[in-house]
Amino acid sequence: MTSIEHNLTNHELEGLQRALLEMLIEVDRICKKHEIRYVLFAGTLLGAVRHGGFIPWDDDLDIAMMRDEYIRFRQACAQDLDKSRFFFQDNITDQHYRWGYGRVLRLDTEFSRIGQGHMRMQKGIFLDIFPMDGVPEFAPFRGVHNFICFILRKLLYAEAGRKTGNSILIRLWYAIINIIPHNWIFAMMSKLTKFSIRSKYVRHIAFPTPKGRIYAFLREWFEDIIYIEFEGRLFPGIKDYHAFLFNHYGDYMQIPPPEKRHTHPVSKFKLPASFSEDLN
């Protein structure tokens, strides 16, 4: 059955960004309490530098931390996360979760991207948390490592791809490889995280790195931190944000033309009930 596509209204996007900021504040509280180091990442860091907050049309929020910090954060969430409003989600806390990084979900919400409504994992407005792992310093080995990451990522994506593939053959291919037990895939990813732990290069093994570059980021970008303003508050960001953003986006201060400013279409969307009166 085809999902009905819904493009967020300005009113809904405002509420979504408010929920994301609420989650970031909660994550920041936990990280400060447990002395866990993290940084604003990807489009969230770009928004902080270029806009002082969210990119106006952005509908997600990303942070990153080294793997050892991520493990501590997961443990801290079990103890200190406000479970009346939030849920820490990964393949351990949700057996149907199919991505190789963690999320904090806002309870009492709905947020399903097109093509993912059939997936049985718990859904809601989410903040992505990317753990960073060491990768080989020798470039050819790093290329092989990147290919392995690509294969494992596609195996995890198969649950979504069997519904969203561009052709019948691609959907059939994803349906076939989706037979591979997901526990085995996550076990292989776990083994990959033990590789080159102290390498000067790192990456999130379950997500693509910028194409045409070195399949990795510099470790120092996630260890040297400054505080950057984001929506009127200060949060940790990459100190050498210029080098990171240029590596990731090129001329990052150039605002894209209107036709390239878009949110992700969704099939289901609902804000927390407590937001309704405030946003009317």
Image (cartoon, grey):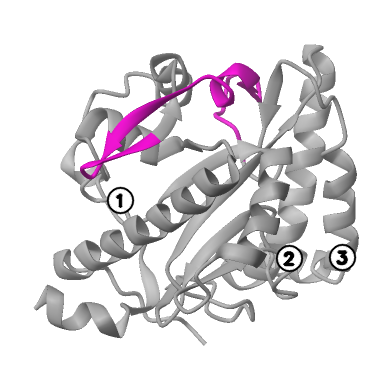
Name the residue: 77% across, 25% down.
Answer: 135
Horizontal placement of 9 versus 240: left or right? Answer: left
Frontmost of labels 2 and 1 is 2
Number of residues whose C-alpha sits closer than 10 Å to that of mark 2, classed few (under 14), some (14–19) or many (20 or more): some
Quarter of the image with the C terminus in it: bottom left
Question: Rounded to the nearest whole Å, what is the CA distance between mark 3 and mark 2?
Answer: 9 Å
Q: Where does residue 66 sit, x and y in percent of width and height?
A: 66, 35
- Inspect the image, locate mark 3, and give the three-letter code of the amino acid beneath it: Asn
Q: Residues in magenta?
A: 208-235
Residue 264 in the image: x percent, y percent?
Answer: 37, 60
Q: Element type at marker 2?
A: loop
Q: Is residue 120 left or right of residue 174?
A: left
Q: Is residue 40 left or right of residue 100?
A: left
The residue to which callout 1 is attached is 58
Q: Is residue 103 magenta?
A: no
Q: Position of residue 237 (x, y in %)?
A: 43, 30
Give the quarter of the image for residue 147. Answer: top right
